[in-house]
Amino acid sequence: MVSFELNEDHRLLEQSVREWAHREVAPRIRELDRAHRFDPSILPQMASLGLLGISVPAEYGGAGMDYISLGIASEELEYVDTSLRVIMSVHAGLNCLTLLSWGTEEQKQRYLVPQAQGLKIASFALTEPSAGSDARGIESVAIRHGDRYVLTGEKMWISLGHVADNFLVFAWTDLEKKRARDTSGMSAFIVERTFKGFASGTLDQKWGILAGNTGFFKMDEVEVPRENLVGREGEGFKIAMFALDQGRYTVAAGATGLVRACRDASVQYARTRKTFGVEIGEHQLVKEMIAQMESDYQASRLLWMRAGWLKNVGQRNTRETGLAKWFATVASERAAGDAVQVHGANGYSDEYPVGRFYRNCKGAVIYEGTREIHKIMQADYLLGYRTDRPSRCELPAWEGTTK
Ligand code: CAA
């Protein structure tokens, strides 16, 4: 039986995250955003709500909640500000859930447990100055010397890059395969910021998600113990793609929350602002924008929930997660643009939150797979070029067609 009802645990989570974000963050988010300031005091608060290890089992220090819970929390956080959801995406999604699936027992005890408890903050580092969409194009290398690897390279656009304690880092361990762009030569490592040769900074030129930290780091012959290799040598690319299945899911659900925030702000404004002697909600072209936001919200929510359900039952979900991420992020861009439009000149000022929504939505149309990468992936599933979730196409023998 298919059910669209949230269970009691989901509803309690939704309520507690909503109340916390509305009470503790919403009243001061504009000031944090204006000051381009990441507030680290948010992290222990998120930890006490269980959000930093939300879908990690209790035996590894987490809250043991399912994937639908992860989606609900993502929606609620991004409803208030994208920077909150990004914390959960990189720490709990991209990093913790990947260690849970690919880490050794020792790695889980040493890294996952304190991360899930929120005692250590973690991030994910694939992107480099010259390699974003083209994940095979990274330049970082990890050369084995006895019981250690020596990592050299640079990572960029790393969420929490100047904040996190631990990073899941991708680098080539086979230089011949690097030259041939054969992904079976890439490996994954846990790198601590305290390792010698690691240096990070904040990218302070960005114009969205200003209350979040986005950084870069350089690894200058950073020595990483062999025990910090995640998975086997050569499995790094698969691990990166697996991690993105987790991260993209939280991005999809988060963008859905942003669509809802745009919708609610627009409805409220349309009921108070008057032009031509009536509330602007009376004008059909305003109704059109609000109706679009509602259909975008409902469709985005169904898409991330379907991906979450597949995750809950342990099925491969790259296809469904990618579709949810693509659709919801593009929908959030449309909703934010229209929310500013509904607010008119007021939307063009940061007296109202919709200007911030407009700046915040754009990042997710680019990171964790651009809109274009996701379009190509969806087409490739249909065309049979990607086969992990095959399509069924059973055309009838229409008159005039040949097989
Ligand atoms: N789980 C497990 N294995 C997977 C997988 C998954 N989700 N996805 C792919 N794989 C496996 C494949 O099965 C394949 O294995 P075999 O060779 O054994 O068959 C292998 O990995 C290679 O996969 P693909 O053939 O799909 O690789 P590709 O080169 O065709 O991928 C691409 C192309 C889809 C465009 C990919 O490069 C991609 O997703 N690019 C976008 C990267 C991205 O999102 N970057 C943003 C990172 S965000 C960041 O770093 C900053 C931050 O703070 C979050």
Image (cartoon, rainbow, N blue to C red):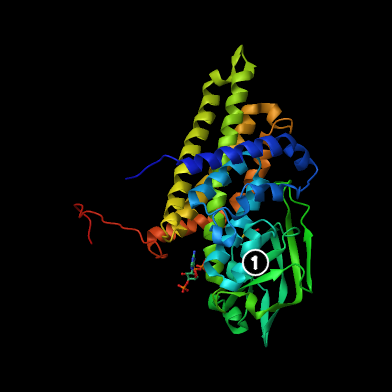
Instruction: Using the rendered image of the protein, determine whether residue 330 is visible from the camera's viewpoint.
Output: no
Residue lying farthest to the front in this orientation? 59
Q: Residue at 81%, 43% (x, y): give it.
A: 35
Image quarter (top left, top right, bottom left or bottom right) of the N terminus: top left
x and y percent of residue 275 in the render?
63, 16
- How many numbered circles are shown? 1
| Relative horizontal placement of residue 243, taking residue 216 as reference (left or right) | left
Q: Which residue is drawn at 63% across and 19% down?
A: 272
Locate residue 186: give its quadrant: bottom right
Label 1 CB less than 8 angstroms from ligand 1: no
Left or right: residue 165 compared with residue 299? right
Residue 124 position, x and y percent, is: 64, 63
Residue 273 in the image: above or below residue 22? above
In this view of the protein, which residue sits in the foreground, 324 or 108? 108
Secondary structure of the residue carrying tag 1 is helix
Read off the residue under disc 1: 111
Q: In which quarter of the image is the C terminus?
A: bottom left
Q: What residue type is labelled 1?
A: Tyr
Residue that protrudes farthest toward the bottom in the picture: 146
Q: In this view, does 357 lie above or below 238?
A: above
How far from the left and from the top, in percent, is residue 200?
78, 64
Residue 280 in sight from this viewpoint:
yes
Up-down: is 128 above or below 289? below
> As drawn, which residue projects farthest toward the top?
277
> Is 29 in front, or is 15?
15
Q: Nearer the viewer, residue 216 or 250?
A: 250
Q: Which residue is drawn at 68% across and 30% down?
A: 347
> How many residues crowd around disc 1 within 10 Å: few (fewer than 14), some, or many (20 or more)?
many
Left or right: 268 in relation to 9: right
